[in-house]
Each structure stands twice: as structure tokens, then as C-alpha cells.
Image (cartoon, rainbow, N blue to C red):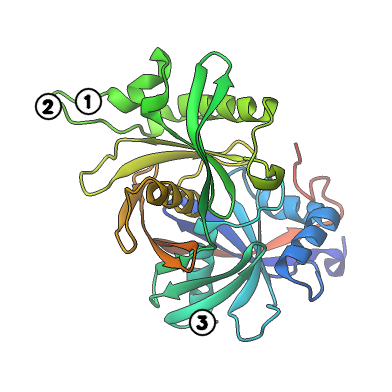
Amino acid sequence: MPDSQIRRVHVVDSHTGGEPTRVVIEGGPDLGRGTMAERRCLFRDQFDEFRSAVVNEPRGSDVIVGALLCEPVDPSNAAGVLFFNNIGALWMCGHGTIGLGVTLGHLGRIKAGTHRLETAVGLVTFDYDGANRVSLENVPSYRFAHDVSVDVEGLGTVTGDIAWGGNWFFLVDTQHINNAQYSEFATRSDRNGHPVAFGIADVNRLTNLTQRIRQGLQSQGITGADGGEIDHIELFGPAGSPENHSRNFVLCPGGAYDRSPCGTGTSAKLACLFADGKLKPGQVWRQESILGSVFEGSVRLEGESLIPRVTGTAFVNAEATLLLNPSDPFQMGIRG
């Protein structure tokens, strides 16, 4: 195969609290000059093979979230970005935004300070500390519905909240799962009576549980606003550290679980806490992931809108060139 026929895609990999992000720096498709929402539609409809080539096996995995770096509509903004994963285009990604901020700093494209980023759900702002820490001011978030009951096969009725944090979430406190197989996640303790958080050893059971909940939502037609698909399921239980408030497990679209505390999921959680009167503007909520990594979250009011702020750390761990060889039967990834 002549070298000139091999397509090269330059990427930078990072992880945010353990959750990987792959930023496409060069070699992506030309999506024109429309808004990020318009470009997302074009990317979804015409360039799904490219998405698969970047994040699916054999170059990627079910866990990697891709971020296609785009020229912003407004040149005063730091960048435009489209997020995607192993099954399709995403609307927004909080951990990915934190990873992108650190990646842009690593590349010398931004310096410490406040920057604006164009996304498919609108303009977001982030503060970059010049090293590895980013504070994201996400899109307005809100609780759409409270104490929603869903019939789950093998579990009975599970109650949770529906909230928007840049993606649609169904949030469930493990205390509200009345099933002996899973209720221990909220009640188990050590010999001294201290709560024991769920962890990596529980991933298979937590995945099975959240998949059942998502299937129940879909089969019963339970959605977010305007029929928006609830494609993220978020469970909460006791924190592993007394410094933190709770630990979560987030099932993402495609069936992988979030290694980080999930930026959009934390935003949705903050919206629910605020709606319940349990979080005041400026008050810090420390959210653990299944790995024990932590995001710090708070909210502020802008008119009638609730603006979440999520802070986390990311580390660049690779710079690479992906080779898309037309002779390779899996040039565009292994697609399920």
C-alpha cells in the first residue's frame, strides 16, 4: 500500500479521574462552519465510520470518549468540540472537557486562565490552572422529574430522579433499591460500623443493575424533556472517604461505566441536590467515582438558570498518529 493512501489522524490521549479522552487534533473530517449542534448532526449522519475508527477496537475501546477539535464559530473562543463514544455522537462530556482543557494547555494552545468552548449543547466556560486542573462551568442544568417509578425486571419498582446535566440521567440512591441482591450497596459496613463504599469488585453487578434500569425506562417510554432519551444511569451510595459526600456509578451509552465521577452526571446530581434544598449556591459537593477519584461541584444562579461548576484533574498520557490503511479490513474499527 503506497504511503500516500494511508490516512493519518493525530490524537492526544488523556485521562480525567481514570476516564480516558482521545482528542483528534488533525486528520478529522471537514464539517463546515455551522454551529457545533449543526456539525454534530453532520458528523453523526455522514462520518460515523470515522468515529468508529478513532474510538472502537482495534485502536480504541468501549471506554474511550473521543473529542473532535473544531474551529470555533467565534474566533475569540478557545475551540469548538464534538464528543463521541463507541456507539455514536454525544451531546456533551464533562470529563472530556476537563481532559480537553489540559490537552490544549499541553499543546500550548491556551495558557492559565478562563476560556470559552463551543459544544453541541452551547457555550461552556472553563478555568485552567496551567497544569492539570480544570474547573468547568457547564450548561444550565435542572431536575426534570422527581421520584419517578420504573418497573425493573427482577427488581420490582425502582424510584429515581430525571435530570439534565448536558446529557439525560436517571439518578438512583441505592437506599431506594428494595432488593436483597443489591440493597447491600447502601447498608454494608465494616466491623466498626462505618459504611463501606461499592468498588471495582462490584462492577459486574452494578453494570447489570443499571442496564436493567435503563431497559425498564426504555420499555416504559420514560424520557427526559421533549422525548429526550435517558441514556445515562447514575447510582449513588456511601463515599469511601469521610472527606467526600457520596460515591457514584455511572452507566454510559454503549454499556461501559464511567471511571471518573462523570462531569455531566455530577452536574445533574447538583441540580437535584439544589432542587431538594440540600445544596446552596457556592457550597462544595465532593463526588467520588467508582475508582475513588473526586470531582468538586458547586452551583450558582444566573437569572433562573442553575449553572454547575465541576472541578477535576486530567493527565496527558499519549501523543499518537492513527493510521487508517485502506487495505486493513478493520480500517474503520470493529463495529457492533
Q: Callout 3: helix, strand or loop? A: loop
Q: CA distance from mark 1 to mark 2?
A: 8 Å
What amino acid is at disc 2? Asn
To which residue does mark 1 refer?
A: 189
When asked about the image quadrant of residue 150, the answer is top right
Looking at the picture, how far across and down is residue 336, in whole percent?
A: 75, 36
| Category of crowding for the residue at label 1, using alpha-carbon neighbours closer than 10 angstroms: few (below 14), some (14–19), many (at least 20) | some
What amino acid is at disc 1? Ser
In the image, what residue occupies the spot 34% across and 62% down? 281
Q: CA distance from mark 3 to mark 1?
A: 46 Å
User: Compared with residue 332, is residue 222 higher up or lower down, i.e. above or below?
Assistant: above
In the image, what residue occupies the spot 31% across and 52% down? 286
Q: Callout 2: helix, strand or loop? A: loop
User: Compared with residue 294, is residue 130 higher up or lower down, i.e. above or below?
Assistant: below
Q: Nearer the viewer, mark 3 or mark 2?
A: 2
When asked about the image quadrant of residue 116, the answer is bottom right
Q: Which mark is residue 221?
A: none
When asked about the image quadrant of residue 3, the answer is bottom right
To which residue does mark 2 refer?
A: 192
Looking at the picture, how far across and down is residue 278, in whole percent?
A: 32, 48
To which residue does mark 3 refer?
A: 110
What amino acid is at disc 3? Ile
